[in-house]
Image (cartoon, helix red, strand yellow):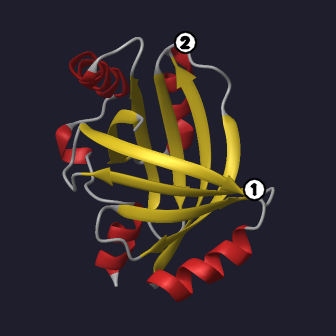
Amino acid sequence: MPTNIEIKAHVDSIERLLPTVLSLGGSEPEHSSQDDTFFECPGGRLKLRVTGDGHGVLIFYRRADEPGPKSSYYVHSTTSDPDGLRLVLADAYGELGRVRKHRAVVQVGEARIHLDSVDGLGDFIELEVAVGEVFGPEEATEQAHQLMEALGISPADLAKGAYLDLIMAKL
């Protein structure tokens, strides 16, 4: 199963953070709108992501609900019928909730930096450092720590869980 080392942190403004991200040697950001539907899944998390162009990706992942950096194991599959798949999964497993966001993704070395504006929550940054050919788990974790420092992300800024958990905690 593919693995990333990840963190998620609340930030004051993704617009103010973007120049710092780009100064780290990042590519120009790729922008997308995303609508994630989460389903009951006792062995991890299962979500269907639909992007603004109608593209769908079913994603299963397993990671600890702690602030991070932490390992995230994931698998995914694309679909050309995300609305139909959402109905099937909701009937079969039960829908937990939805998260809508605008995401800008910047690649910095082996790290993907997500700058997210999440409906009802505000602005966040996610770092994903790939574990694999370039970095083992320890090196990927060290890379995540280095990026956190470069971006001014403190342990107090870190969030645990998924965006859905943060939205549900506000209710």
Where residue 28 appears, as percent x and y from the top left, is 68, 25
- Could you tell me the amino acid type at mark 2? Gly
As drawn, 65 above or below 46 = above
Q: Nearer the viewer, residue 147 or 59?
A: 59
Q: Secondary structure at mark 2?
A: loop
As drawn, 168 above or below 75 = below
At x 57% / y 40%, what residue is drawn? 15
Between marks 2 and 1, how big is the CA–CA gap?
29 Å
- Could you tell me the amino acid type at mark 1? His
Q: Of the residues under marks 2 and 1, which one precedes in the sequence?
A: 2
Q: Nearer the viewer, residue 64 or 69?
A: 64
Q: Is residue 44 left or right of residue 126?
A: left
Q: Is residue 5 left or right of residue 122?
A: left
Q: Nearer the viewer, residue 53 or 14?
A: 53
Location of the C terminus by quadrant is: bottom left
Q: Is residue 39 left or right of residue 137?
A: right
Q: Which residue is mark 1?
A: 55
Location of the N terminus by quadrant is: top left
Where residue 79 appears, as percent x and y from the top left, is 71, 58
- Residue 37's quadrant in the figure? bottom right
Dot 1, crowdedness within 10 Å: few (<14), some or many (≥20)?
some
Dot 2, crowdedness within 10 Å: few (<14), some or many (≥20)?
few
Mark in front: 2 vs 1: 1
Where residue 19 appears, as percent x and y from the top left, is 55, 25
At x 51% / y 55%, what residue is drawn? 59
Q: Which residue is mark 2?
A: 25
At x 46% / y 60%, what residue is drawn? 122
Q: Is residue 72 left or right of residue 108?
A: left
Where residue 86 appears, as percent x and y from the top left, is 63, 76
Q: Secondary structure at mark 1?
A: loop
At x 60% / y 48%, what residue is drawn? 103
